[in-house]
Image (cartoon, rainbow, N blue to C red):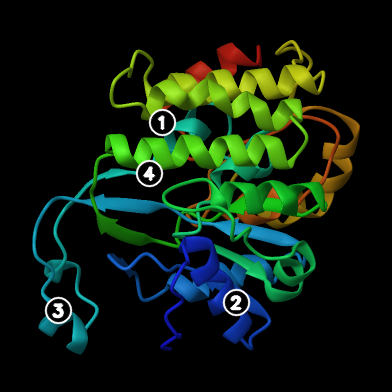
């Protein structure tokens, strides 16, 4: 699809133009020019949207080592050999490892609605008003849309199989100034709401002149601050363990919503295909619902210690 050039524009305006041209029920927002996706990308997004109609689905973005894509080979076949090696991910995997793989249980899940790999039903994007085209330059126009979708009651889910890749880049001083300007607009637009303003915590993760805090440390602090604002800092006691394998997965799925409504849960999914990942993230509950797929023996030990499980 080729869209008309807009003299004074930006990423938000370009994405809105794409949404306006879209005719399908689900819009996959992925407009970064330096990106490629796996063949199963759209299927992975669609699979989760069949679980729930009011869902924002995100997927991981891998950073590629500097190198040249074999465009000619990619035009003929989907081949990982034609793509440079993945040297890292966008960081959300680290946040979920620190808390839970239930993306919807993050108080700041809306902040991670990175539009390089995101899908939402078109009716929700239209109802929310699309992207705010006053956001210019790099950063936060997608997080701000995520915040509005969150405020409208949509749930958030992360599908690790919806894989996209892009060439790696560092945040430059110019990009940081654009990001900070968009942050000020974001905060002002929402009346200095505390759960929006708390994003100022992560400035030190992006500022090339002052990276005194690691990105993950900033994100962990932001999550805890947002939970505290909502009175959501439960002691890690009283959790019930739900340990699931392939044999009892179906039976567990049937009773999981009722269990999640009654008590705080730690769900450990030992199925090969992460059978419970999508359904767990689609459960709305006022309780804590932690989810982990196939944790290693060491990670399992940490989970049991953290939640004081027998």
Residue 233 x/y as whole percent: 74, 15
What element does badge 2 sit on?
helix
Task: Indicate which label's residue lies in the foreground, 1 or 4.
Answer: 4
Please give the residue where the numbered disc 3 appears in the rendered image.
71
Splitting the image into 4 quarters, where does residue 242 fall? top right
The residues tagged by marks 3 and 2 sit, at their Cα atoms, a distance apart of 27 Å
Residue shown at the point (59%, 55%) measured from the top left: 134
Going from N to C along the chain, the mark reached first, 4 or 3, is 3
What element does badge 1 sit on?
loop
Going from N to C along the chain, the mark reached first, 3 or 2, is 2
| Residue 220 vertical position relative to residue 88 in the rendered view, above or below | above
Residue shown at the point (81%, 54%) measured from the top left: 254
Asked if the residue under mark 2 is in contact with the one under mark 1, i.e. CB atoms within 8 Å, the reply is no
Please give the residue where the numbered disc 4 appears in the rendered image.
90
Residue 198 visible in the current orientation: yes
Going from N to C along the chain, the mark reached first, 1 or 4, is 4
Q: Which of the pair 81/67 is nearer the observer?
A: 67
Going from N to C along the chain, the mark reached first, 1 or 2, is 2
Please give the residue where the numbered disc 1 appears in the rendered image.
296
What element does badge 3 sit on?
helix
The residues tagged by marks 4 and 3 sit, at their Cα atoms, a distance apart of 24 Å
Left or right of residue 160: residue 241: right
Residue 225 x/y as whole percent: 66, 18
Task: Indicate which label's residue lies in the foreground, 4 or 2.
Answer: 2
Asked if the residue under mark 4 is in contact with the one under mark 1, i.e. CB atoms within 8 Å, the reply is no
Residue 200 x/y as whole percent: 56, 24
Please give the residue where the numbered disc 2 appears in the rendered image.
19
| Residue 254 vertical position relative to residue 306 in the rendered view, above or below | below
Query: Around disc 4, counting alpha carbons within 10 Å, would you say few (fewer than 14), some (14 to 19), or many (20 or more)?
Result: some
Left or right of residue 196: residue 72: left
């Amino acid at each position: 699809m080729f869209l008309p050039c807009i003299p004074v524009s930006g990423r938000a305006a370009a994405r809105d133009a794409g949404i306006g041209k879209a005719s399908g029920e689900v819009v996959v927002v992925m407009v970064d020019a330096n990106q490629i996706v796996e063949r199963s990308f759209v299927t992975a997004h669609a699979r989760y949207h069949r679980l729930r109609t009011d869902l924002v689905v995100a997927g991981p973005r891998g950073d590629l080592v500097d190198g040249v894509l074999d465009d000619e080979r990619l035009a003929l076949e989907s081949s990982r050999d034609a793509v440079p090696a993945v040297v890292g991910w966008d960081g959300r995997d680290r946040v979920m490892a620190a808390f839970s793989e239930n993306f919807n249980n993050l108080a700041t899940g809306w902040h991670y609605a990175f539009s390089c790999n995101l899908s939402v039903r078109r009716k929700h994007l239209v109802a929310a008003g699309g992207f705010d085209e006053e956001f210019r330059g790099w950063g936060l126009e997608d997080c701000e849309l995520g915040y509005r979708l969150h405020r409208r009651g949509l749930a958030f889910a992360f599908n690790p199989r919806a894989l996209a890749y892009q060439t790696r880049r560092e945040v430059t001083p110019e990009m940081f100034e654009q990001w900070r300007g968009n942050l000020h607009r974001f905060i002002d637009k929402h009346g200095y709401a505390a759960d929006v303003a708390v994003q100022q915590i992560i400035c030190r993760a992006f500022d090339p002149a002052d990276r005194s805090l690691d990105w993950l440390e900033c994100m962990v602090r932001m999550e805890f601050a947002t939970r505290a604002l909502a009175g959501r800092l439960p002691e890690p006691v009283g959790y019930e363990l739900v340990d699931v394998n392939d044999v009892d997965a179906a039976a567990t799925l049937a009773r999981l919503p009722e269990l999640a409504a009654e008590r705080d849960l730690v769900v450990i999914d030992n199925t090969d295909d992460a059978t419970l990942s999508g359904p767990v993230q689609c459960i709305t509950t006022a309780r804590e619902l932690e989810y982990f797929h196939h944790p290693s023996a060491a990670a399992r030990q940490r989970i049991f210690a953290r939640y004081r499980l027998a």
